[in-house]
Amino acid sequence: MKKLESSLMNMVLVLTGVAVIMGGILAYVNHLTEEPIAKQQKKILADGIKTVMQAEEINVSKTDTLRQTNAKGKEEVFIIYNNEKGAAVESTTDGFGGKLRVLVGFNPEGQILGYTLLAHTETPGLGAKADKWFQKGEKGNIVGMTPSNPLVVKKDGGQVEAITASTITSRAFLKAVNNAYSAYMVKPVDAQSGATKQVNKVK
């Protein structure tokens, strides 16, 4: 019996030791990759702002974070990157496979200058087509439109061609764009401002 107890204790000690070592290794690797990942995300955002504003260089004069409660009582967060051409607005909705994070560029009148998907978990080859489908010259083109009346897919009586076999993703995408427009047009006085009297140049 003592031999069995000794073996069990040894197993517990070994497993504990392995868990501690692995935890340390994972923490170290996370520390090493944290900064490069943050830099990459910052670059993706900077490139996205230039893309949606249709500019090779853009100056972000102020960043606002707007929090609103939707009809279901759920808080929605919008990040507004104000610049000399209007603003790029970050908006997130639930798509078919998960969260759909969209960045939309608007001119001062609220006309869509461009958009890009910052993140999504939609089905490759179907919902993932949202990255291109609604761009200028494509079937579901929304560039140049002003969502003063919400953009809606044709299947629901609207004016926008939905992605083939991906109506749910199309609805979610247009909802993100419509919400981004609403957030931009609110021009909140009490929005939580994220930094900056100085001008941040996006290169």
Image (cartoon, rainbow, N blue to C red):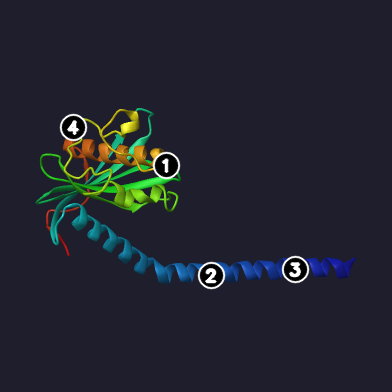
Q: Which comes sooner in the sequence, label 2 or label 1?
A: 2
Q: Amino acid at mark 1?
A: Ala
Res. 72 image quadrant: top left
Instruction: Please name the residue that numbered disc 1 is placed on.
Output: 165
User: In the rendered view, does 125 fall on the left or right side of 84?
Assistant: right
Instruction: Please name the residue that numbered disc 3 is placed on.
Output: 11
Image coords of residue 186 (percent x, y): 18, 35
Q: Which comes sooner in the sequence, label 1 or label 3?
A: 3
The label nearer to you, 4 versus 1, is: 1
User: In the rendered view, does 149 fall on the left or right side of 71?
Assistant: left
Q: CA distance from mark 4 to mark 3?
A: 66 Å
Q: Amino acid at mark 2?
A: Gly
Q: Are marks 2 and 3 in contact (CB under 8 Å)?
A: no
Image coords of residue 117 (percent x, y): 31, 51
Residue 97 seen = yes
Which residue is farthest right? 1
Instruction: Please name the residue that numbered disc 2 is placed on.
Output: 24
User: In the rendered view, does 182 fall on the left or right side of 172?
Assistant: left
Q: CA distance from mark 4 to mark 2?
A: 53 Å
Q: Are marks 1 and 3 in contact (CB under 8 Å)?
A: no
Is 61 drawn above or below residue 186 in the view shown? Answer: below
